Every structure is written in C-alpha cells, then in structure tokens.
Amino acid sequence: MLSHLRPAIVSAGLFTVLLGLAYPLAVTGVAQAAFPAQANGSLVKDAKGTVVGSTLIAQAFAKPEYLHPRPSAAGAGYDASASSGSNMGPLNDTLIKREKTDADALRAENPGVVIPADAVTTSGSGLDPEISPANARFQAPRVAKARGLRLAQVQAVIDGQAQGPLLGFIGQPRVNVLTVNRTLDARFPAHGQKGG
C-alpha cells in the first residue's frame, strides 16, 4: 500500500513545486525582464511620476476637452473591481432607455452626424480603454471647441495615435482614449491647465 502511495505523494509535491512555484516565478521573471512596463500594468505617469492611469483600463473622462471612452457597465462605471458587461439583452427596457438617452445627448452635441455604435454601447468588460477611430472623430469637434483649437489639430492627434488591427488582421482599428487625452494636454493645454 505504501509503495503505491509514496509515488503519488512525491509526484504531487514535485508538480506543486514545479508548476505552482518555479513556473510562475520563471514567467514573472521573464516578463519583468523583457516587458517591464506591460508586466507592471502599462501604467501612465505624469511629469512628477504620479500614476494617472493605465493604457489597459478605461477611466471616466467627462470634461468636454477630452475624448470620452465607451459607456461602462462595470460597477458605478469604470470600476475595475466590478469588471463586467451589463448582461442586458437587446430588448431590455433599461438598456434601450440608456442607449436612447446617450444617443440623444450625442445627437445634440453633433447634429446630423452618424453616431458610432461604440459611443452608446458598453463592452464586455466595461473597461475597454480604446474606442473606434470613428468614435474619436465624432468627438473631435467638441474637443476642438472646448480647447479653442482647429478641428484639424485634434484630428491630427487622433490620427497620430490611431492603431490598426494587431498584425494587420486581428481586431479592429482603435484609438486609446488616455493616450490621446494625454497627448492633447501636452500639446494643447486646456484652459487653466499645464501640459504634461
């Protein structure tokens, strides 16, 4: 009996050490050495070194001089500890009312322009840091007006930050909201604000 039990115990101990300790430590070490910024959350810092966000997680931008991210269903909005979609179906009255309210506000902001779908729909996680280039261009007139800029200046920043699909075919073209907003602040500080 002991002769059968001993190999099982040794195997369990060996694989616990190997796969529960050695492998995770090795992967963490390689990640820290090869990709330190990504391994530490792709944090964005200001000129003083204070963390102001992450390029991987959306945050609420409500001021008119900033691009706004997709709506969020994560907790009270952009709550990383409650990452999830709304789980509401397309016929859910609450979802329909929220999307209609959002669409009406966007139509008032930019009359006569087609509203991009991601301007009124939440993502699966509720924390997508990126929006479509169409959504960014839709918001550009508001941002330009709030900053006292020409529309072309804002669009140039958006175009400069736009990313194509990964490897040319995975995913959709996208614009990181935080990156664009930080670039706008650096190049064209909003009223009473220093760049950086």
Image: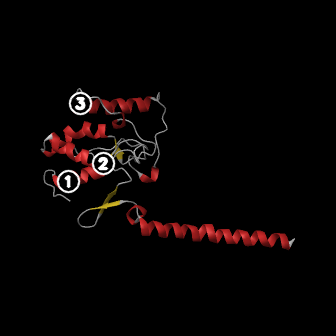
Q: Secondary structure at mark 2?
A: helix
Q: Amino acid at mark 2?
A: Val
Numbered circle sitting on residue 144: none
Q: Secondary structure at mark 3?
A: helix
- For disc 2, the marked residue is 177
Residue 84 in the image: x percent, y percent? 47, 45
Quarter holding the N terminus is bottom right
Numbered circle sitting on residue 185: 1
Q: Earlier in the sequence, mark 1 or mark 2?
A: 2
Quadrant of the image occupied by residue 67: top left
Residue 161 seen by the camera? yes
Q: Is residue 85 left or right of residue 113?
A: right
Q: Earlier in the sequence, mark 3 or mark 2?
A: 3
Q: Amino acid at mark 1?
A: Asp
Give the total of numbered labels. 3
- Tell me if mark 2 has few (under 14), some (14-19) or many (20+) residues whose alpha carbon lies within 10 angstroms of its own: many
Q: Is residue 148 left or right of residue 29?
A: left
Up-down: is 132 above or below 187?
A: above
Quadrant of the image occupied by residue 196: bottom left
